[in-house]
Image: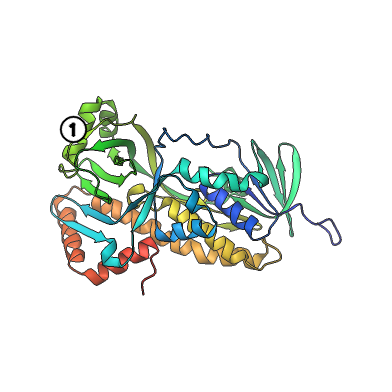
Amino acid sequence: MSAGAATPDYDAIVVGGGVVGAAAALGLKQAGRRVLLAEARAPKPWEANQWDPRVYALSPASIASLSALGVWADVPRPQAFTAMRVWDRASALDWSADDLGVPALGQIVEDAALLHALWPQVETITRCPASLSSFEAADDHVAVTIDGETLRSRLLIAADGAQSPIRKQLGIAVSSKPYPARAVVAHLHCVAGHADTAWQRFAPPGPIGVLPLSDGRVSVVWSLDAPDDARVLGLDDDGFCNELCAALDGQLGHLSDPSPRLSFPLRLQHAAQYTHGRVALVGDAAHSLHPLAGQGLNLGLADVQALLDAAAGADDLGAPQVMARYARSKRAANARMLALTDALYRLFGARDPLRAGLRAWGLNTLNGLPVVKAQLAAQALGITRQ
């Protein structure tokens, strides 16, 4: 755009109206920016008698970000977890909120609940359904074509998912590694109760994450290699509950009444760069990781916070220094978390005696070092300790 040309239509256009994209758009709106949120499909209306199979363990840092946006109080039926237990056949590791001096280690929420709180706050800046057909970057703006209309923006934010068309059009390289497993997901009743605890069991068939729900049930994510994934999906409800109960050593008691089981493939993925000119990648467009550490959405919301911080006070949201600050603050840190998650998967998914023994020694040793254990948990959960 030449000198003296018209001011761009927007300070930022956000493509993708999931939790991360909606949070980014809301944060920029609240900062007084001219923002457009473009999304292909609106979320389904909230129904209190329906439960979303997509469940997240939000860290205190993520909750603080949502609170700063003014939406956390509007999120329906969050469930606090005050303890975490990680165990296998020969070792165990436990954390509690009391040990860390906090009310809770985090909150379990549904994807639909988060969208229910976020979307009313961004309706006035949202175009939906909207389809981005192309974009072209210039030195001082990005020309974005949405539904045949070309709009100019200082910044384009790609919150368009793991298969991000924007990232692909830019030609940003991605390191990608599929895991030889699928995640089997269901909600179940447990007779022993969940005790406000998040559980991670490393069982021989594959790691199992168990998260407490506010109605007393639990949400289960079971990572299973082929052919176990197909076999478990093919079990009837009683067979599934019995096998899951055995894999959990019966610690949650009898399990029953599973919701319809879903499954999805697992992949580690990381973009080689988070910015390209005036385009910034956030959330799954930048990174995807194994769900065993429960960090996927937390990383995405941290991306949003970092981008908002980098843009604070800037006249031009897409200026090189803003993009550099954002990329510098997040990519290396996220790379470390992805590497740690992958290492945990490799270590805890191991069935050979040598690595299983090393795993047991490591868990038991760490459990006996309360200061180190607390520091590790505080860092992972974004807890500020006095």
Q: Tell me, yes or no, if residue 349 can be seen here.
A: no
> Quadrant of the rendered structure where residue 276 is?
bottom right
For label 1, the crowd category at 10 Å Cα-Cα, with few meaning under 14, some 14 to 19 and many 20 or more, is: some
**Picture residue at 45% right of the left edge, 56% below the top:** 299
Q: Quadrant of the N terminus?
A: bottom right
Query: From the viewer's perspective, is 40 left or right of 373?
Result: right
On the image, the x and y values in percent for residue 296 come to 42, 51
The residue lying toward the viewer, choosing from 34 and 294, is: 34
Q: Amino acid at mark 1?
A: Asn
- Which is nearer the eye, 190 or 277? 190
Decide if residue 386 is on the left or right side of residue 29.
Answer: left
Q: How is the image coloured?
A: rainbow
Spot occupied by residue 197 in the image (x, y as percentages of width and height): 27, 51
Quadrant the C terminus occupies? bottom left
Q: Residue 115: x and y, percent? A: 51, 44
Q: Residue at x 60, y 53 (%)?
A: 26
Give SS at disc 1: helix
Residue denoted by label 1: 242
Can residue 279 be seen? yes
Q: Position of residue 297 (x, y in %)?
A: 44, 51
